[in-house]
Image: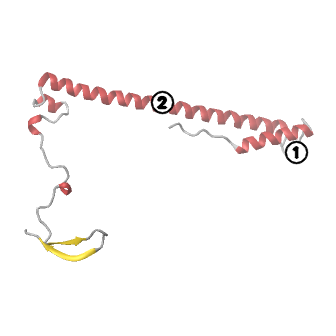
Amino acid sequence: MARRKRTSQVLEKAARRAAGINSIDPNLNVGNGLTLSAFSTLIETMRTREHLYNTALSNLDKMYHDMLQTERELADMAEHMLLGVATQYGKSSVEYGMAGGVPKNQRHKGLRGESQVPSLQQPSFIVGVNGNGSKNGNKVATTS
């Protein structure tokens, strides 16, 4: 996802204000260094910096995309390298383990998730439910 570019409402408002002041007097000077030319210069400085900032974000987005692409290529090559070692030396070899694989003869085949294994204990009774979803109160004994 591309980074959000910045737009300055202050810049837009200042540009509109400068246009209005320019229509009053292009050489307006209200004292203390507040001139239309200084105001216009600062507006252009802000416009340039905003443009540079947004360009930098675009470049950063491209660099990030390039990095992710290289990361995918690296993951692919790492997998192929391991498969190449497995092909050349075998999946049960010490070399396969040295390359980062788990040798075939060292794999542990465990059960997937202890919570998924059904319990050997059965309930001592089951409460029956009739067709409308309410309990009918009949208890049925089960064997353990």
Residue at left 26%, top 70%? 130
Badge 2 element: helix
- For the residue pair 130 and 115, the one nearer the viewer reads as 130
Q: Is residue 78 left or right of residue 27?
A: left
Q: Give the image location of residue 95, x and y in percent.
A: 13, 28
When the figure is inspected, residue 96 is found, relative to residue 137, above or below; the finding is above
Disc 2 target residue? 63
Q: Amino acid type of disc 2? A: Met
Q: Residue furthest right?
A: 25
Q: Is residue 20 left or right of residue 139?
A: right
Q: Give the image location of residue 7, x and y in percent.
A: 66, 40
The image quadrant where one finds the C terminus is: bottom left
Residue at left 15%, top 30%? 96
Q: Contact (CB < 8 A) between labels 1 and 2? A: no
**Alpha carbon of mark 1 to alpha carbon of mark 2: how far?**
47 Å
Disc 1 target residue? 31
Q: Amino acid type of disc 1? A: Gly
Residue at left 10%, top 39%? 106
